[in-house]
Image (tube, helix red, strand yellow):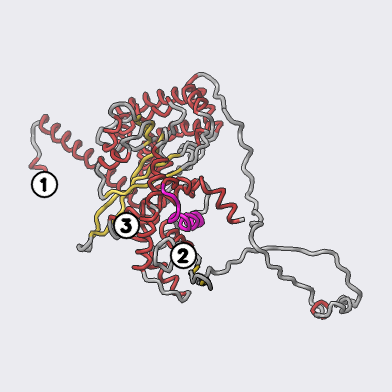
Amino acid sequence: MSSASDDQLPDDIEALKALVRAQQTALAERDQEIDALKLFIAKLRRAQFGRRSEQSGQGDSPADQLELRVEDLETDVTERTGTPFVSVTEKQPPAQRPIRKPLPAHLPREDLRREPDCAAFAATDSTAAACNCPACGGALKRLGEDISEWLEYIPSHFKVIRQIRPKYACTDCEAIHQASTLSRPIERSNAGAGLLAHVITSKYCDHLPLYRQSSIYAREGIELERSTLADWVGQCSRLLAPLIAALGVYVRSADKLHVDDTPVPVLTPGRGQTKTGRLWTYVRDDRPAGCEDAPAVWFAYSPDRKGEHPQAHLKDFTGLLQADAYAGFNPLYEGGKIKEIACWAHARRKFYELAAAHASPLAHEAMRQIGVLYAIEEQIRGRAPKVRQRVRQEQAVPILASLHTWLRQTQQKLSQKSALAEAIRYALNHWDALCAYAEDGLAEIDNNAAERALRTVAIGRKNYLFAGSDSGGHSAAAFYSLIGSATLNGINPEAYLHYVLERIAQHPVNRVAELLPWNCAAAMKTQAD
């Protein structure tokens, strides 16, 4: 007896074929949707629980994230170009086991002397008789000593500084003489520069929200309300505004900039809800190209992600712009004064996500070929731009051509709705910008410098949840700029902010650039000594 479903099947063979084809198409679309959902779930799981490193363990990731063996690079370049690979640096010796470093010599030492369990050694009289051996009673003689060290922590403490200014009156003319008061960062405030620097660094460098700091200070018996701390932060931001402006001028005067942005939740006053603001980062760092100019980072806040904001920030900039494919940057490239350099890390990340979610052999192959490009960069990091350009033209350009051919051929074999086809399409759509780094030795292969600068924002965002207002967003941009620039130059950000806050109120505004981190590093070291 036939089932109801069998009765509904057509008797015509052509109609049956059409029905089968339709079902096959529906199944293929369902498989694609399932793959897309699996990829989406994998991304969410990685964002929530997974490691941030895009390491695959197969030697095929960017130099900052994964190592590619030089032997593999030599083989690949030789096979693709027909010419032997020439390394511009000597091979590094094999890695050795880490050795514990000695404790810093500048720290104070406290000796804890441990004598043998002998009454004579414990006596306070220096003329006490020599100790006899507890085992046989014989006299002991000194052979030397063993010294071991460990690091101890003494909790930080507060102190009150009293400024005493005696008044003197002349006995003849009755004129009164008194020393002028020392300036403080915030007028009529009882906060010293060191305390303000500590509060700012704790919030924007160590990611401690102000309410947590208030609780920490309360354990020390110091009552500092969160509102008081917030007011101090805002006033310091306004005080440092000329210095932030000078930092922005320095950063944007470079010939190459790394640019990126990240969302920040911002509280909407009176509504109890948050909106999404943006922090834009602009990084000047040409050390990988052998430049000795000081690296620096400048942050800017905007209440939204409209392209008009970076366009305003970079209206006077001329040079190389390393950025992602955000459409808001496109007007900047018109006219030719700014050249787009796309990011290979962005292109690679799409293949990495597929390889991690589906173990796709094609995605792994794309990552491997991109890894060859990164290995070439590892060999020329820190070299002069002319050297970098020459090596890229000789070694990277043939690899890029081969990769482009492989992407085209692979794309033709895939469904255009698949995630892998989308990853390939992204690379091909931005191919000229992705290859532009090979034409200029000053450029980098990716935009990781900007992503590293934004890392501290992402960590802090998980702790303090949101900025209190747009003015709080501008304050955050100011302090991320100073702390990030100090860190790039190897300067303790808290010590730097302490130094600046002690001086900026009385410093001539036309010479404020003297207080940029690299300009006052020597004075800070002299003061510390």
Say which label, 2 or 1, has the lower sequence index. Answer: 1
Q: Which mark is in front, 2 or 1?
A: 2
The residue under label 1 is which amino acid type? Ser
Count of all numbered marks drawn on residues in the image: 3
Image-quadrant location for residue 102:
bottom right
**Residue drawn at 45 percent across, 61 percent down:** 183
- Nearest the viewer among 138 and 523 is 523
In the displayed structure, 105 sits above or below 328; it is below
Q: Which residue is mark 3?
A: 472
Residue 259, visible in the rendered structure:
yes
Per the image, is 498 magenta? yes
Disc 3 crowd rating (10 Å Cα; few below 14, some 14-19, many 20+) is some
Question: Between 178 and 185, which is closer to the camera in this rendering?
Answer: 178
Q: Position of residue 106 (x, y in %)?
A: 64, 58
In the image as oriented, which residue stretches furthest toward the front? 172
Label 3 element class: helix
Q: Do tag 1 and tag 3 residues touch (Cβ < 8 Å)? A: no
Judging by the rendered image, the residue that carries numbered circle 2 is: 192
The answer to which of marks 1 and 3 sits earlier in the sequence is 1
**Label 2 environment density (alpha carbons within 10 Å; few <14, some 14–19, many ≥20):** some
Q: Is residue 121 magenta?
A: no
Secondary structure state at the residue bearing disc 2:
loop
Q: Is residue 18 above or below residue 104?
A: above
CA gap, disc 2 to disc 3? 22 Å
Alpha-carbon span between mark 2 and mark 1: 88 Å
Q: Which residues are magenta?
A: 493-509
